[in-house]
Amino acid sequence: MKENDINKSVADSLEMDTGMLPFVPELLKGMWALGSSPERVVELLRPLGLDPAGTKLLDLGCGKGAVSVTVAHALGFRAVGIDACEVFLEEARQKAAEWGVTQKCSFELEDLREYVKEASDFDVVVFASLGGLLGDYHKLVGALRRTVRPGGYILIDDGFLQREKPVKRAGYGHYTPHAQTLKQLFAHGDTLVKETLTIEESKNINQEYLAIIKQNAKVLLENRPELEDRVAEYIRGQETECEILDAHITGAIWLLRRSPAKP
């Protein structure tokens, strides 16, 4: 994957222009999970009774490694984290060392859109807070189920439209009302293990992270005042995203079990 492609992919996922990427560590300082809930992932996976020593988890768009590290520590699974931001991966490796799970976690610099085309035989795949990066839910499940063994598990942390009217904003085109969302999720013949709505949880996470970003931005601008306009634009985008999510999207996590039949 070319460096320019990597930068564009990371910038798009963070809703900023590529020129702001050097300042990501400062803007996102103090944010580990980056929108997902590692504890919720553990809560959903624990009852499955998977063998700690033999279970391998794929964490797509792993960011700073919160899901991988937490699952490895709590459940003993081996975890492979994939992300296109090396700065995030460096912090993920540091966290794995701090939590004593370095031997159970590996973090790789990859474009997850390409990685899913070749990956296979994982027991669990996690796709958390990444929006429509792999298309609508029908396409997303189609891509994710190829990465897990027959009978393996797919965990998606995202949401659905509260009403019929779609959201006219880049990155929101994959959202559909609940019934249509479920139809897409099950289109490949997989079964629902559990659906968990995360309405208040998602809202609280979004507001907490927005507050952290604003505080970090103040510190950044003390040293780099020339970035004021670009930082202000980034924060406005984050504020708009929080408003749209609160007004139009119901947060949800779906745990699916891939059909034992071959795709």
Image (cartoon, rainbow, N blue to C red):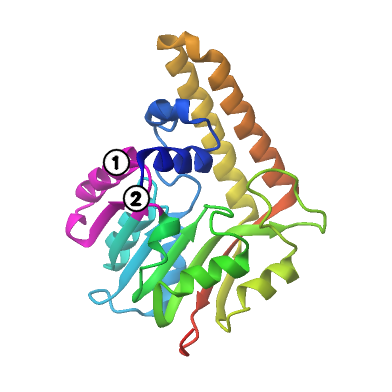
Q: Nearer the viewer, residue 6 or 220?
A: 6
Q: Residue at x 19, y 53 (%)?
A: 100
Mark 2 — residue? 65
Is disc 2 in contact with disc 1, using a CB cutoff of under 8 Å?
Answer: yes
Coordinates of residue 90 in the picture (x, y in percent)? 27, 41
Query: Residue 197 has which mark?
Result: none
Above or below 6: residue 69? below
Query: Where does the image place residue 212, in percent across and percent down from the top left?
Result: 49, 30
* Number of numbered discs: 2
Rounded to the nearest whole Å, what is the CA distance between mark 2 and mark 1?
A: 8 Å
Q: Identify the mark at residue 91; answer none if there is no mark.
A: 1
Q: Is residue 100 magenta?
A: yes
Residue 260 rendering spot, x and y as whole percentages: 46, 89
Residue 183: % across, % down: 69, 75
Tell me the amino acid under the disc marked 1: Glu
Q: Which residues are magenta?
A: 82-111
Specify whether residue 105 is painted magenta: yes
- For the point 45% across and 57% down, the residue is 113
Please indicate whether residue 27 sits to the left or right of residue 207 in the image: left
User: Do we see residue 254 in this rendering?
Assistant: no
Q: Amino acid at mark 2?
A: Gly
Query: Which secondary structure, mark 1?
Result: helix
